[in-house]
Amino acid sequence: CACPNSYTGHTCETDTSSSSSVFVSCLDDAWNITVDLQPLRQKYPDFDPDECYIGFDNVNCTGSIHGDSLYFGQNYKDCKTIGKNLTEGIEYSNELLCARHDRLYHFIIREVRLQVKLLCKFFSLDVVSSTPTDRQVHLQYFSDPALTRAKDFNRCRAGEKLYVRALSDVTDSNIKMRLSHCYITPAVITDLGMQYYIIKDGCVIDPNAVVFYQLDHETRFSFQYVEFSNSHGTVHLYCNATFCQKNEHSPACQPTCSSHVARSLRENYVINIQNDTDNDEEKRR
């Protein structure tokens, strides 16, 4: 749909002007949701905080009022929260809804006033299992291209260049590993779109990233560390890999990428050295 301003969703069902007053964070075992009531009261003079609930349960899963805020702290096991085991951790999803119900038939919704998708992801170590499960990708971080100075990933700053070594624990010389996707997410995800891809479908798509070394069981690449404006703090890097036979020539095993990402650090260094030499020569003249 081509939605009007401040509306989004598959059928323009979500009013983003109101959803911006919802603040979602994730505790270890429960939701931590705060709704600013003032915008809703201004927009809907007859607004009742009891109209807001999570998990489609407007009886047992309503919020508690604290001043001008409505707070939800229900456990992930309650209110029809869906838990999903992922390769890299666990994901919880639900929905916050503020709706005007029919006075006589309370199970009938007459008007949706606020609708927000809820999502929390909790990650394990930066190790991603592939298929079969005995094949894994291990990530190591460094501050130099020679990989001599180890770097703590969570001590990086936005814009800092980071060098990553992706290793497979496969020892079979007839099998090769190719990184299919590498992406960054915040430690706590409240939006399904909060994934920044460095490598996608086997190709580098981040303009500041480059794959500079690749063997059958190892890939090295560099990129500039990023942060999320709406989620400060720890971020995670995840890499998925495709394991192929050496003689396999499928697109997943030998992706066709644009030429501008098929450069190497060595080429960049040669260009930089050449530029420096030209500048020195110009100065001598």
Image (cartoon, helix red, strand yellow):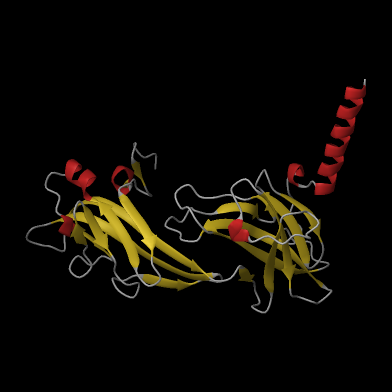
Figure check: 62 above or below 208: below
Figure check: 143 above or below 172: above
In this view, the residue farthest toward the front is 284
- Is residue 239 toward the left or the right of residue 284 in the image? left
The mark total stands at 0
Residue 35 point in image, percent of width and height: 27, 53
- Is residue 13 toward the left or the right of residue 194 in the image? left
Q: Quadrant of residue 101?
A: bottom left
Q: Quadrant of the C terminus?
A: top right
Residue placed most toward the observer, 15 or 1: 15
- Is residue 268 toward the left or the right of residue 242 in the image? right
Residue 225 point in image, percent of width and height: 62, 50
In this view, the residue farthest toward the left is 104
- Residue 109 in view here: no
Query: Residue shown at 31%/52% (left/top)?
Result: 22
Residue 190 point in image, percent of width and height: 42, 57
Query: Residue shown at 65%/74% (left/top)?
Result: 131
Residue 218 point in image, percent of width and height: 77, 65
Query: Residue shown at 69%/56% (left/top)?
Result: 202
Query: Residue shown at 12%/62% (left/top)?
Result: 106
- Residue 24 in view here: yes
- Is residue 90 toward the left or the right of residue 8 in the image? right
Residue placed most toward the observer, 34 or 16: 34
